[in-house]
Image (cartoon, grey):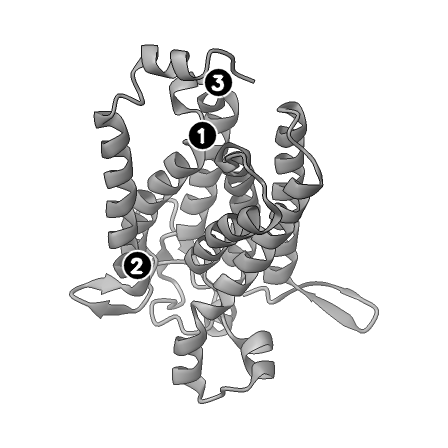
């Protein structure tokens, strides 16, 4: 739809890449600000952040590797890196694993989920603007806020069987942007001040996003591969169950009772 945002001399800046980079920068600023507020920023934590970003980028690419090769037959590294797709869910999984790996590698002992949660939420909101401007919008709808594509825009949208000129389409990426902005506001202005949720904010965010994303997939227009479900939904089922099981176990152990939370963490920052 809008593959390039602007040009710098002979170089055209890709829209999606620009907003992904901008989202990464926004997330980094939020992370550093929160780490400084909690007086936790140091060289070890900086190494953890770099490793998390690296593994997140690798996860986003690797999670679409098989699909790209199957569709194009191109297994070259150049084709995969330059033309292969990226998956937000793969990026989140890679980043989560990267944080654990690099915390172990640099010997960083503290938990970092509360630092990452607001940063990831706001960074995702910014990055999804690039998706809105470059990818298929969603399935047809009669709702008044549906977006109508012109014939030119419909023809320029890749692999979008539902992008027919004149049809209203769900602005699925707008839904995602609003969700992530709302989660950032919820975490930043309320949840990070709740003692019983200390060290749990990233998992709260991930569980909320897993449930939301599973639902929004029904109006995304992504390929259905099994029993009416998309690849993302199939991935989200075990992920959501694991997160729910984690919170149930913590709740049964009394972790979220006010007295237990205050006793464990008498001072909050």
Q: Which residue is mark 1?
A: 199
Q: Secondary structure at mark 2?
A: helix
Number of residues whose C-alpha sits closer than 10 Å to that of mark 3, classed few (under 14), some (14–19) or many (20 or more) = few
Report the residue at 45% width, 30% height from top.
Answer: 199
Rendering coords of residue 57 (x, y %): 56, 61
Q: Is residue 234 left or right of residue 155?
A: left
Q: Kindly indicate the quadrant of the structure image that contains residue 247.
A: top left
Residue that label 3 marks: 193
Quadrant for the C terminus in the image: top right
Residue 39 higher or lower than 66, as above or below: above
Q: Position of residue 263 (x, y in %)?
A: 39, 12
User: Which numbered disc flags the more N-terminal residue, 3 or 2?
Assistant: 3
- Residue at 60 percent across and 76 percent down: it is 82
The residue where tag 2 is placed is: 235
Q: Residue furthest left?
A: 227
Give the Cα separation between the discs numbered 3 and 1.
Answer: 11 Å
Is label 3 in a helix, a strand or a loop? helix
């Amino acid at each position: 739809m809008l593959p390039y945002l602007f040009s710098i001399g002979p170089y055209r800046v890709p829209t999606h890449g620009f907003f992904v980079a901008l989202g990464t920068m926004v997330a980094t600023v939020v992370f550093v600000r929160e780490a400084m507020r909690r007086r936790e920023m140091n060289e070890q934590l900086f190494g953890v952040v770099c490793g998390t970003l690296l593994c997140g980028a690798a996860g986003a690419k690797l999670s679409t590797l098989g699909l790209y090769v199957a569709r194009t037959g191109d297994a070259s590294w150049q084709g995969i890196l330059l033309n292969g797709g990226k998956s937000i869910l793969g990026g989140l999984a890679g980043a989560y694993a990267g944080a654990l790996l690099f915390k172990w590698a640099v010997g960083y002992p503290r938990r970092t989920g509360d630092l990452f949660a607001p940063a990831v939420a706001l960074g995702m909101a910014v990055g999804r603007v690039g998706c809105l401007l470059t990818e298929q919008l969603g399935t047809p709808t009669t709702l008044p806020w549906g977006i109508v594509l012109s014939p030119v825009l419909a023809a320029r949208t890749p692999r979008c069987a539902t992008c027919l000129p004149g049809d209203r389409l769900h602005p699925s990426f707008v839904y995602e942007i609003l969700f992530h902005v709302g989660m950032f506001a919820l975490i930043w202005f309320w949840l990070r001040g709740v003692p019983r949720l200390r060290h749990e904010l990233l998992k709260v965010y991930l569980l909320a996003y897993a449930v939301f994303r599973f639902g929004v997939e029904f109006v995304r227009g992504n390929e259905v591969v099994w029993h009416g479900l998309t690849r993302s939904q199939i991935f989200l089922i075990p992920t959501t169950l694991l997160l729910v099981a984690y919170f149930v176990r913590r709740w049964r152990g009394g972790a979220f009772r006010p007295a237990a939370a205050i006793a464990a963490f008498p001072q909050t920052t």
